[in-house]
Amino acid sequence: MPEFSNTVISLFHSRAAPDQGGLLTGKNPADVNTTDPLRLWIIQVGIIVSTASLLSLGLRKIHQPKVIAEVLGGILLGPTAFGSIPHFSQRIFPEDSKPYLSLVANIGLVLFLFLVGLEIDAAIIKRNARLSASVALAGMILPFGFGAALAVPLYHKFIDESVKFTHFMLFTGVAYSITAFPVLCRILTELKLLDTTVGIVVLSAGVGNDIIGWTLLALSVALVNAGSGLTALWILMICVGWTLFLLFPVKMALLWLARKTGSIENGPTMFFMTVTIILVFGSAFFTDVIGVHAIFGAFIMGLVVPREGNLAIALTEKLEDMVTIIFLPLYFTLSGLNTNLQLLDNGVTWAYTVAICSLAFTGKFGGCTLAARYLAKFSWRESSAIGSLMSCKGLVELIVLNVGLQAKILSPRVFSMFVLEALLLTFMTTPLVTVLYPPEKRVRASGTGANFNNVNTAEDRREQRALHDGARTRFTFVLDKLEHLPGMMAMAQLIQPPTPASSAVDDKRTSKSSSLVLSEKNLSIEALRLIELSDRVSAVMKSSASETLLLSDPLLAIFRMFGQLHDLSISTALSIVTFDDLAYSVTEHARNNNSDLIVLPWLPTASAHPEAALGHHEHEAMPQTPSARTPGAYSNNPFDALFKTSDRSASALHAQFVRGVFSRASTDVALFVDQELSIPARVAGSKQHLFMIFFGGPDDRLALEFVVQLCASPNVTATVLRMVKMETDAPVSQVTNAHLSGGGEKGADANMLTVASAMAGFPDTVYGHHTTETRMQSETADNVAWAKYASPTTADAALMSSALSRMEFRERATPIPLHVAVNEVKTYQETVSAEVRAARVLVVVGRSRRLAVENHTGELKDLIADYGSVGTEVRKTMGDVASAFVVAGAGSGLVVVQAAEVHD
């Protein structure tokens, strides 16, 4: 059987594998290989994405949308800049590789137009049709007319005669009249205009403008692709029929499928996603083969997807990252490669470019401004802001221009002129709106929002608090993460007014009821849900769908139910802003809603207590006094506490946000630190004991007032300990043993306490210089406040008998006040709390970053050496006194308060 033998032998003598062009074979991976273009494609994608990302980092600082960075990156990589470098374009972007880039870019464009359709909510138009219709129409008609008029000289000067004038006129008119709805949404969100009358009208007008614009683009493409007018009519009729088919039968079928698969309740399933993607590309294919661009079919499919249960937002979250990171930069880089600003090489060309930019802005700005002023009856300031926002072009016009370039309607020179115009108008939008419509001139239109012009002053708020004898009745609770929710619930329960039954019992004790006892009608809590605005499209969609999110957000839903179960009046609000604006958003919201106290959440660092982090109760597994510890036994790198992935709530970013609120707030602020990592099974009930450490200063005086207010509730008791630091000549180690309740001898390896100089670091808030006079005034105020509650007059005792009956006042003089205070709290937790089954022991302290009576940094350093390290961000955020309790793990929770400037 020689045939079989020859066959077997041939298997072992097969031809060598084809050369893969690897580095080891001496081949250049960047060489064009039409059968295997992956390597060069990856190189191109890396260069494109890196360039766009680097440019966006700089442009983000001046609040410019990312699309500008993507287009600028494409222009830089094109013949305008890097393309002028010898062999750059031939090596990195050779002509043979562009079809592969174009294929991937157009796939991304189809998906992006699908996302644009998902972003558009027709309900917005219905709700605001009366105000927005005139603005939308004026913003289309006048620019279209200007574009058609300018098309005449442009056509005769720059366009080949083989192109029909009507086709060119249509494209210039559409490019002039279009508004970039996706970019407009982001600008409205970043400028915090979504809840203003201007933002609502612009959003509604932008939706209508976008729909009409894409329809006109479909008409333009159909006319270009049709051989005759009759063919164009047939194309349009088929396109209308396909649109109706998608908007009614297909939409109903998708809604049925979403309900059947549970996609509305639980997010899109794999099967629903598969069907949706098939329909997107199927619709794009159909509109492309009938003579209308594929992007129109994808756009209509975006409108078809059901909006119930925020399904459109969930779908966007599934697709947006790849589209935003890879596909769109590729598309706009191809647009930049086709943009050659070197073609604008003479005065006539630049004159036409200036005319294009001027007329484009004048048409949009003028038409929308006049319509808003005379038809919608807005003020001139609001009307000009509407006109500025509607003149934003963004990526939508660039898509229109690229379609015209691909259809050979626009020449490369005219294309470059219009790209420059789109970039300029988009760049102008944010700074122009900021100047024309500053925050203090804005009018809020939401049901819960406040007009900026009618904000109560600090004096007004003080007068309101005087009605309740200084009690704080309006609270703003900040909710940003699920893990912060238990702490905020504990704080809300703490401020809960006493029940009528308990108030009646208190009334029997005195003839006059305490004015600090508040009813549910007086107490008002607003839960402010914070969502960070990222670069994702879905984040912008959440901003425009804020009304739905207010009802469906799980954190707000849980907090509302908690309020109902505890008879608390809780209202809700939502703020979606960038990280840099989170603190500003909180403080402005509290100011506009006349809040008396902002309540912020925080979790402790787990690095100081490894046993607690593992679930052991500190009473059982950890030493109880510094003398029993090995120095530095639990000391970790501070960066572990700041950036540990499992404890992101204690990260430097959250600390930066908290300090931002502290430094900007014109109202009082309370930071609730939840230190109870695990709740023992034996703990029950709602009783809470407050341990207030009073050193002095405006923050401590506020803390004392707040504790007295809280003790009006029969479920709250308090111990107020005034610490006075005394001087001594005795060795520090002897002082430690004498003043700590343990009093035992320290081991030979124990750490010796030393008085150290102030640790490095700068305060986050810069306060005015305090003179000897102001400090004496503050000390006098401390003594008056202490005497008012610790040794009240007969009249004061009668007014506050209910609260003072649950409070114990003590004074301690010691050279180590932080050690003594920590030991007092720990002793109470270990003995009294266990006996009376008090569920939580909360430590209340002032932040004391302003007019601090004592400098505790030296003693804090020794506590850190004994108990373990804590990050510098923690000390800078909550102050030295509070940091001591965090380091030692004393107390189930910690309330750190800062008084507003008006209290001095």
Image: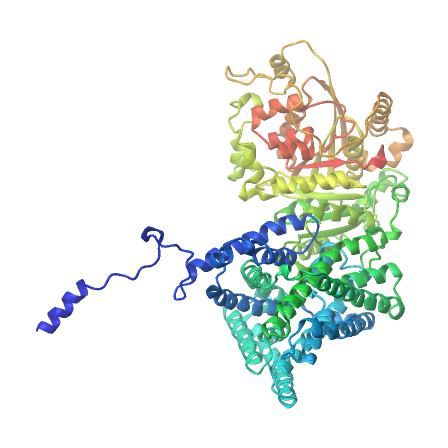
The part of the image, by quadrant, that contains residue 839 is: top right
Query: Does 231 sit left or right of 348 as displayed?
Result: left
190 and 331: which one is in front? 331
60 and 790: which one is in front? 60
Can residue 833 be seen here? The reply is no
Can residue 374 be seen here? The reply is yes
**Residue 692 coordinates in the image, percent (x, y):** 73, 31
Q: Is the residue 461 above or below the residue 316 in the image? A: above
Q: Is the residue 640 above or below the residue 152 in the image? A: above
Q: Residue at x 85, y 63 (%)?
A: 383
**Residue 158 coordinates in the image, percent (x, y):** 67, 71
Q: Is the residue 353 above or below the residue 240 in the image? A: above
Query: Does 475 sit left or right of 863 as displayed?
Result: right
Q: Residue at x 89, y 32 (%)?
A: 796
**Residue 742 coordinates in the image, percent (x, y):** 60, 20
Q: Quadrant of the N terminus?
A: bottom left
Query: Does 94 sit left or right of 212 as displayed?
Result: left
Q: How many marks?
A: 0
* Residue farthest toward the left in the current orientation of the protein: 1
* Residue farthest toward the top in the current orientation of the protein: 729
504 and 533: which one is in front? 533
The part of the image, by quadrant, that contains residue 143 is: bottom right
**Residue 687 coordinates in the image, percent (x, y):** 69, 41
Q: Quadrant of the C terminus?
A: top right
Q: Is the residue 579 above or below the residue 613 in the image? A: below
Q: Residue at x 54, y 52 (%)?
A: 50
488 and 436: which one is in front? 436
Name the image colouring: rainbow
